[in-house]
Image (tube, coloured by chain):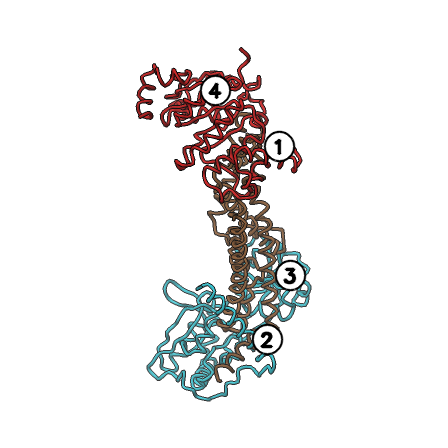
Chain colours: A brown, B cyan, C red
Amino acid sequence: MNWFDKFCNDFTLNFIEGDRWKWILEGLGNTIIITIFALIIGVLLGIIIAAVRSTYDKNGADMKKRGGPAYVFLKIGNTLCNLYLTVVRGTPSVVQLLIMYFIILVNVTNGVFVAIIAFGLNSAAYVAEIFRGGIMSIDEGQFEAGRSLGFNYLQTMFHIILPQAIKVILPSLFNEFITLIKETAVAGYVGVMDLTKAGDKIRGRTFSAFMPLIAVALIYLGIVVLLTQLLKQLEKRLRKSER
Amino acid sequence: MKKKLTAIITLLVVAAMAIALTACGGSKPAPAPTPAGSGSGSAPAPAAGGKLVMATNAEFPPYEFKEGDDFAGIDVEIAGAIANKLGLELEIKDVEFGSIIGGVQSGKFDMGMAGMTVTEERLQSVSFSTSYATGIQSIIVKEGSDIASPDDLAGHKIGVQADTTGDIYCCDDFGDENVTAFKTGADAVQALISGKVDCVVIDNEPAKSFVAANKDAGLKILDTAYAEEQYAIAINKDNTVLLDQINAALEELTADGTIPGIIAKYIG
Amino acid sequence: MEEALIKVRNLKKHYNGGKVKALDGIDIDIHQGEVVVVVGPSGSGKSTFLRSLNLLEQPTEGEIIFDGEDINAKDADINKHRQKMGMVFQHFNLFPHKTVLGNITLAPIQLKKIPKPEAEAQAMKLLNMVHLEDKATNYPSQLSGGQKQRIAIARALAMEPTVMLFDEPTSALDPEMVGEVLDIMKDLAKSGMTMVVVTHEMGFAKEVGTRVIFIDHGQIKEENTPKEFFNNPKDPRLQDFLSKVLI
């Protein structure tokens, strides 16, 4: 049972001594806080961006005909949204995080807050495309049927398009949540102790790679497996409601 | 089906970890009881005429750094002098700082020399030679800071480079919640300049470079250092022969003025 | 003669800055109770014409006067006018997330603010008319193509439109289901509904149409009573077209 003793010694050294397991717990807490709040920001902002872009695609011609400032605002908004999507999706999230920490929010001392903002803004770009993709996946005929009955653009969206699109959107949104959890592993770059950083911190003290890295990996994996199971349940239920 | 299997395996592993936690947590055994001189033979002393493999992380001037393709620095020159004394050929491996102890432990390297401080944790994994140099952990603050000496650090936000001795000491002394660890020393100094932390604790030599590089930011190094630390050579626990040889060599090289000469050459 | 229900004047639809002319100056009056059947080769612009009548296709220029108002004018409330113009699509376009009853009552409840029980009672009458009252609680995916199209007609009728637009309503159907849809359309025509029908069903045009229109290259090339239209075509393109569709 020599290997077992060694395993126990390693385990004690890495997690029990100096209450190092508390770092893991704190890191896990920060990872979850950053992910959830970033996703909330991402969804709210993402919906706005998707609304602007979808409205421009689907209703822009109508608004152009009626003229007025609304169309001008929509066009400018659409251009800005496109620029935003290009920049956010064209740069690594860790670079965005560093820019947010050292340049934009230079006077904010709370690293977790900065990480929430940075990942939230990052996630918004992807959420926006998830929503837009969901809306665009609905057959144009549905839109025309709604309009032909006399529904205006927004009524058609809410009564006809979105109830169908949500079945496409929800699983992708859940996937974005899962991706985001793993993305936040770079929060350590701005001095935030997330789950990955907690493992690094233990490694920096105990110089054993195996225990902290495997423990951190297992925790991420556990969360992701759990969420994936939930996602499958969700998809099953959505399919059922289709009949 | 395959996914389900993966899920089951994952759960099993997590369960095993949990059981281990209970088993290990119950008795809390003394750390790593490796009897001295047990002679498992995993790392025999290098034979005369052979190689002395040294692991370092050549990004820590003036102790070790690269000059073109060659290694230079205090540690590099001292190692050269030791190898000379033992009649061995010095071979330098440039690796991650965090991998040095592990490599020495596993016998991959004969010794680790990288401005490395002796700590309790490290002593559980490797043996250390007698100290050959002293490192200083300095405190950088902004001009006009209310931190005037290490005694004032309590209650302030401290920036450090992750996993350095500065990080470890500050966490122990002032609590994890007051210490913000950055990937690089430069990031920590940037955070100091923008007011995210109140001071930075870091090795004295890089501290000097950072303060010089950010002249406009009004930074200064406090006259009183935060800590002094003893740099020593890490050697495999089982290799008591090499430990004795190196300790003897260090003693001779200090006595004949070689080591003080090397240090004086790099640190004015 | 009374005022026309729909007056179309100089209707044009251009693409690529005028290089492609889908509609090239259409003028037509459609009167109350008429069944106007529109025929023409594919790509002739006949569907574009129909879809322009309720502005699903935005015309490049021209007037569409409906209920005495130019609905193509900038300040016209097109959503209000569309409530009076029912439309039936080639691909049915039923709402898959709603039951048959939900499909029919959605617009009356949401747009006309008719109480749900009342809207459902009216929907049941319409289902009776299309002979599908037993499908009220089914979802569209459980219906055959012919049944779907009959529901789509009932859905459009639920808004009590003054005119019904049919965009190739039988083109996507299996042959054995064409009859059941045409029967409903015949009933509708007999009840006095004003209808504009784009179709390839020449039998329907002959039997039910009050007027048949031939569109080619975005223009009306010929319009006449069905009898004259089929027996005595004058435009050479129409003669060619009829020789191909009527064997």
Q: Observer-nearest residue: C2 or C40?
A: C2
Q: Observer-nearest residue: B65 or A20?
A: A20
What chain letter is assigned to the residue under label 3? B
Q: Amino acid at mark 3?
A: Lys
Q: Amino acid at mark 2?
A: Ile
Q: Closer to the camera: disc 4 or disc 3?
A: 4
Q: Is residue C17 left or right of residue A181?
A: left
Q: Closer to the camera: disc 2 or disc 1?
A: 1
Return the x and y of residue C149 as percentages of the image width and height: 48, 35
Residue denoted by label 4: C61
Q: Is residue B18 left or right of residue B59?
A: right
Kind of element beneath mark 3: loop
Residue denoted by label 3: B157
Task: Give the residue furthest to the top.
Answer: C1
The tag on residue C111 is 1
What chain letter is assigned to the residue under label 4? C
Q: Indicate which disc, 1 or 4, sits on the residue closer to the N terminus.
A: 4
Return the x and y of residue C4 as percentages of the image width and height: 53, 15
Return the x and y of residue A222 as percentages of the image width and height: 53, 65
Residue denoted by label 2: A16
